[in-house]
C-alpha cells in the first residue's frame, strides 16, 4: 500500500507499472487503486525501482513526506512522572497493547520539548511560562498512523498504576494534532450538567471519542450555560454536530456549532459593524444585524466568550424595568426622527441620498404611529448567535412579518439580544403575544430561537411604557425589612473630622467591628435591630446597673422630657480558663422600646471622649439579630408561657377542692362523752 502526496504521482505510478517499468527484486510488479478501507491504513513506502520521473522527485520532498508521516505515527504522552520508578516501562507496556511500538523517547528535556513543538499550555490547560517544569513527556512511535490514532483513544485520560495523574495523549502530527480544529461549542446547557455528563452525551454512548469536555463557570461557581467539546478528527466532530444538534440534555435543547479562532472572530465582528448612530441614543436599531460567532480555539478565550454567552443564558423572565426603559428610548428616537423629517418636509427641503444610503421616510401622523405600534411586538432574550432570518422564521408562524429590527448596543457595537418585529396586520402581533402568555401558563411550548427561550410582548406607546414603569417601581420599592440603612450608623471614618484624636486601638476595633457586621449581613437571615444597641470598649469593672444609668442619662441630656424605657440590659462575660473566674468582655447590649431613644443614645455616646477616657471611647452600633434564633426564642417563650398557664390552672383547681373540704366541720365525742368540734386545717 503506497500513499502518494497527490493524484498526479499516483497516476504516473499506475502507468509505469502498466508498462512494466517498476521492478522490485528484479521482478515486474502490477499496481491498482486500493479500496477505501485499505487506503486509510496505507504506508508511504519509498519506491525502490521507480521511474526516472519518480526518482527526480526524491530528495527534500520525499524527506518532508517521511517526516510528516513519522510525526503522525508518534503519540505525545504526558504526566509520566520521572520520579516514579519504571514509569516509562509501564506506559510502554500499555501502549504496546494497541499496536507495535517502534520506539519510545523520553522523558523529554526543555530543549527537546521546544524542538518537537509540544505545547505545555495545552497539556496543563492554562498558560505556562517558558521556564515551567516539564510534566513528564515521552514520545511513543508506532509503525502505522491508525495505531497512533487508536493509542490516543485508549491512553488519553487513563490511569496507570503508580502514576499520580491520568495520562494526557495526542498525536504529534497529522489530523490528531489539530485538536483546536475539531472543537465545537455547546450552547444552552442546563445548569445542573457536569463535564462527565456532557462527555457521555457528546460521545453518542461510546460511538465517538470525546478528547476533551470543558464547561466554564462564573465567579459564583455556577455553570454559565455553555461548554466546549473537542474531538481528534473532523469526521467525529461533523457527526456530533449532525446527530446531536437540537437534541435534549437533561430536558434542555442544546445547540452545537464550530468554534472559530480569535482573530477570525474579531475580523468578522469588524466586518459586521453597523454604521454609527446619532449621539444621545444608547441603542441602535438595524433591519439587518449579524451577530458574531464564538471563539473557542484557545482555552484562555473561554472566559471571554462566556461573558458574551452569559447574557442570553439563565433566567428567561428578564428585567421588565430595563426593557421598558429601552423601549421608551427607542420609541422616543423614532418620534424625534419623524418630527425632524416633518419639519424638513414643511420647509420644502429634500434630503439627498447617496447610492448606498436609504431615502428618508415620509413623516407619519400620530394615528399611523399608533397603528404601527399595534402591529409590533417586542422580543427579548434572543440568542446573540441568531440572525435576522432566524428570528423572522420563528415569528412568521403567527402572521406575515413586514420588518424585523435587531437592537444593537451603541457602546459595545454588538447585538443586545432584543428586537422589534412588525407584522403586516395587528392580528399577527396579538397572536404572537398571546402565544408567549400561553407558554408562561403552561398551555403550549415556549417560543425559542436556535434552542434559546425568548420573551414576546406587545409593543407599547409612550403612555403605556410610563404606566408599566410606574407599576414596576411600585413593586420594586418594597420596605427594607432587614433595616440595612442602619448598618453604617455609628461607623466613623478615621480620616474624617470625627476621627481626629482617636487612638490606634479604637481605630482597629472599629474596623474589625464594621467588617464583622458586613460579613454577618451577607446572610439573608441576619437583620439590623432598630431598638437594640451593642456597646464596646466598656470598662472592665462596669456593672449592668451602671450601663443602664449611663444610657438613660445620655438620652435625657439630649431630650429632657424623654422617659426612655429599657427592656433589656446585660454585659457579656467570659471565663478565664486558668483561674475559672468570670471576666468582663468589655461589651454589652441594651434594648429600648422606641427606636428614637435607641438612636439618640447611639449618637450621644458613640465616639464621645468624655464618657470614659479620651483614649478609650465607646463604640456604639445597632446590634445584628438572627431571624431564626429569634423565632426559636419566641417559640420557647410561648411554650414556657403555655406550660406556666397550664400549671397555674391545675394548681387553682386543686386549691378549690381543698377549700371545699376545709369548710366542713367534723364533730367527734371527747373522753367525757361531750361533743368536740374540730376544724380541718388547709
Image (tube, rainbow, N blue to C red):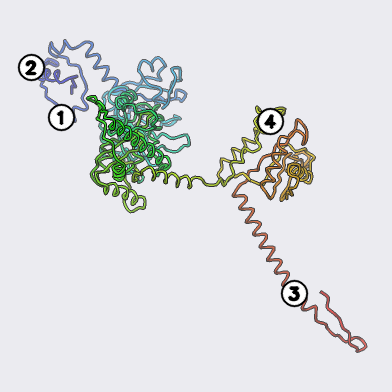
Query: Who is closer to the viewer here, 183 or 450?
Result: 450
Instruction: Name the residue tied to disc 2.
Output: 20
Foreground mark, 2 or 4, reads 4
Residue sticking out furthest to the left: 19
Q: In what element is the residue under mark 1?
A: loop
Q: Which residue is mark 4?
A: 498
- Label whose residue precedes the other's in the sequence (4 or 3): 4
Residue 381 visible, this orientation = yes
Residue 272 image point, x, y percent: 30, 27
Query: Are the residues flagged by discs 2 and 3 in contact, CB closer than 8 Å?
Result: no
Dot 4 crowding, Cα within 10 Å, few <14, some 14–19, many 20+: few
Q: Estimate the spatial distance between the alpha carbons at disc 3 and disc 1, rounded to whole Å.
A: 112 Å
Any part of residue 97 in sight = no
Residue 656 circle label: 3
Question: How far apart, in angstroms, are the residues tagged by discs 2 and 3?
Answer: 133 Å
Residue at the extreme right of the image, as rendered: 672
Residue that mark 1 sits on: 35
Looking at the image, is mark 3 or mark 1 nearer the viewer? 3
* Screen quadrant of the N terminus: top left
Furthest residue in direction front, as rendered: 347
Nearer the observer: mark 2 or 3; the answer is 3
The residue depicted at 15 percent of the width and 27 percent of the height is 34
Dot 2 and dot 4 residues touching (CB under 8 Å): no
Q: Distance between the Cα atoms at labels 2 and 1?
A: 23 Å
Q: Earlier in the sequence, mark 2 or mark 1?
A: 2
Q: Residues within 10 Å of mark 1 (few under 14, many from 20)?
A: few
Give SS at disc 4: helix
Residue ID at (77%, 34%): 610
Amino acid at each position: 500500500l503506497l500513499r502518494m502526496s497527490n493524484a498526479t504521482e499516483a497516476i504516473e505510478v499506475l502507468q509505469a507499472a502498466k508498462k512494466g517499468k517498476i521492478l522490485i527484486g528484479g521482478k515486474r510488479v502490477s499496481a491498482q487503486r486500493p479500496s477505501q478501507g485499505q487506503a486509510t491504513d496505507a504506508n508511504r513506502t519509498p519506491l525502490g525501482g521507480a521511474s526516472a520521473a519518480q526518482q527526480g522527485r526524491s530528495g527534500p520532498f520525499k524527506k518532508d513526506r517521511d517526516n510528516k508521516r513519522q510525526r503522525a505515527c508518534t503519540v505525545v504522552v504526558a504526566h509520566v512522572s520521572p520520579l516514579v520508578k519504571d514509569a516509562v516501562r509501564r506506559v510502554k507496556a500499555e501502549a504496546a497493547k494497541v499496536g507495535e511500538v517502534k520506539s519510545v523517547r523520553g522523558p523529554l528535556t526543555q530543549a527537546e520539548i521546544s524542538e518537537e513543538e509540544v505545547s505545555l499550555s495545552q497539556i496543563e490547560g492554562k498558560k505556562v511560562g517558558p521556564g515551567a517544569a516539564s510534566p513528564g513527556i515521552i514520545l511513543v512511535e508506532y509503525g502505522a498512523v491508525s495505531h497512533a490514532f487508536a493509542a490516543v483513544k485508549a491512553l488519553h485520560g487513563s490511569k496507570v498504576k503508580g502514576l499520580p495523574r491520568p495520562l494526557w495523549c495526542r498525536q504529534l502530527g497529522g489530523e490528531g494534532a489539530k485538536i483546536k480544529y475539531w472543537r465545537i461549542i455547546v450552547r444552552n446547557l442546563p445548569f445542573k450538567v457536569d463535564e462527565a455528563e456532557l462527555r457521555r452525551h457528546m460521545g453518542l454512548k461510546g460511538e465517538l471519542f470525546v478528547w476533551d469536555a470543558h464547561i466554564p463557570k462564573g465567579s459564583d461557581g455556577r455553570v454559565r450555560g455553555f461548554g466546549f467539546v473537542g474531538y481528534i478528527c473532523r469526521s467525529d466532530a461533523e457527526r456530533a454536530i449532525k446527530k446531536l444538534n437540537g437534541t435534549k440534555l437533561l430536558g434542555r435543547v442544546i445547540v452545537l456549532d464550530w468554534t472559530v479562532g480569535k482573530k477570525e472572530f474579531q475580523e468578522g465582528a469588524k466586518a459586521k459593524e453597523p454604521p454609527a448612530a446619532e449621539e444621545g441614543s444608547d441603542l441602535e436599531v438595524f433591519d439587518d444585524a449579524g451577530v458574531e460567532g464564538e471563539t473557542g480555539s484557545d482555552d484562555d478565550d473561554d472566559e471571554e466568550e462566556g461573558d458574551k454567552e452569559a447574557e442570553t443564558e439563565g433566567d428567561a423572565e428578564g428585567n421588565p424595568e430595563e426593557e421598558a426603559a429601552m423601549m421608551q428610548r427607542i420609541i422616543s428616537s423614532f418620534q424625534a426622527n419623524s418630527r425632524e423629517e416633518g419639519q424638513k418636509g414643511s420647509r420644502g427641503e429634500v434630503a439627498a441620498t447617496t447610492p448606498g444610503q436609504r431615502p428618508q421616510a415620509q413623516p407619519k401622523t400620530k394615528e399611523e404611529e399608533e397603528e404601527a405600534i399595534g402591529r409590533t411586538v417586542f422580543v427579548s432574550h434572543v440568542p446573540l448567535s441568531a440572525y435576522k432570518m432566524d428570528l423572522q422564521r420563528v415569528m412568521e408562524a403567527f402572521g406575515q412579518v413586514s420588518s424585523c429590527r435587531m437592537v444593537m448596543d451603541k457602546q459595545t457595537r454588538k447585538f443586545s439580544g432584543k428586537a422589534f418585529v412588525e407584522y403586516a396586520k395587528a392580528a399577527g402581533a396579538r397572536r404572537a403575544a398571546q402565544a408567549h402568555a400561553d407558554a408562561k401558563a403552561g398551555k403550549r411550548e415556549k417560543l425559542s430561537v436556535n434552542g434559546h427561550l425568548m420573551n414576546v410582548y406587545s409593543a407599547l406607546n409612550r403612555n403605556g411604557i410610563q404606566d408599566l414603569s410606574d407599576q414596576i417601581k411600585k413593586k420594586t420599592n418594597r420596605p427594607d425589612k432587614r433595616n440595612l440603612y442602619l448598618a453604617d450608623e455609628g461607623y466613623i471614618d478615621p480620616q474624617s473630622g470625627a476621627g481626629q484624636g482617636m487612638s490606634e486601638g479604637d481605630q482597629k476595633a472599629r474596623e474589625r467591628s464594621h467588617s464583622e457586621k458586613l460579613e454577618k449581613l451577607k446572610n439573608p437571615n441576619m437583620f439590623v435591630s432598630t431598638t437594640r444597641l451593642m456597646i464596646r470598649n466598656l470598662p472592665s469593672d462596669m456593672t449592668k446597673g451602671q450601663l443602664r444609668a449611663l444610657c438613660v442619662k445620655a438620652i435625657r441630656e439630649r431630650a429632657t422630657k424623654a422617659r426612655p424605657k429599657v427592656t433589656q440590659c446585660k454585659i457579656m462575660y467570659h471565663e478565664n480558663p486558668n483561674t475559672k473566674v468570670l471576666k468582663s468582655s468589655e461589651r454589652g447590649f441594651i434594648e429600648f422600646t422606641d427606636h428614637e431613644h435607641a438612636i439618640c443614645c447611639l449618637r450621644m455616646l458613640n465616639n464621645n471622649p468624655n464618657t470614659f477616657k479620651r483614649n478609650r471611647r465607646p463604640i456604639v452600633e445597632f446590634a445584628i439579630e438572627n431571624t431564626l434564633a429569634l423565632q426559636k426564642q419566641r417559640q420557647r417563650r410561648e411554650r414556657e408561657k403555655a406550660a406556666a398557664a397550664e400549671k397555674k390552672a391545675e394548681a387553682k383547681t386543686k386549691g378549690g377542692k381543698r377549700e371545699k373540704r376545709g369548710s366542713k366541720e367534723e364533730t367527734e365525742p371527747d373522753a367525757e362523752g361531750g361533743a368536740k368540734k374540730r376544724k380541718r386545717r388547709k
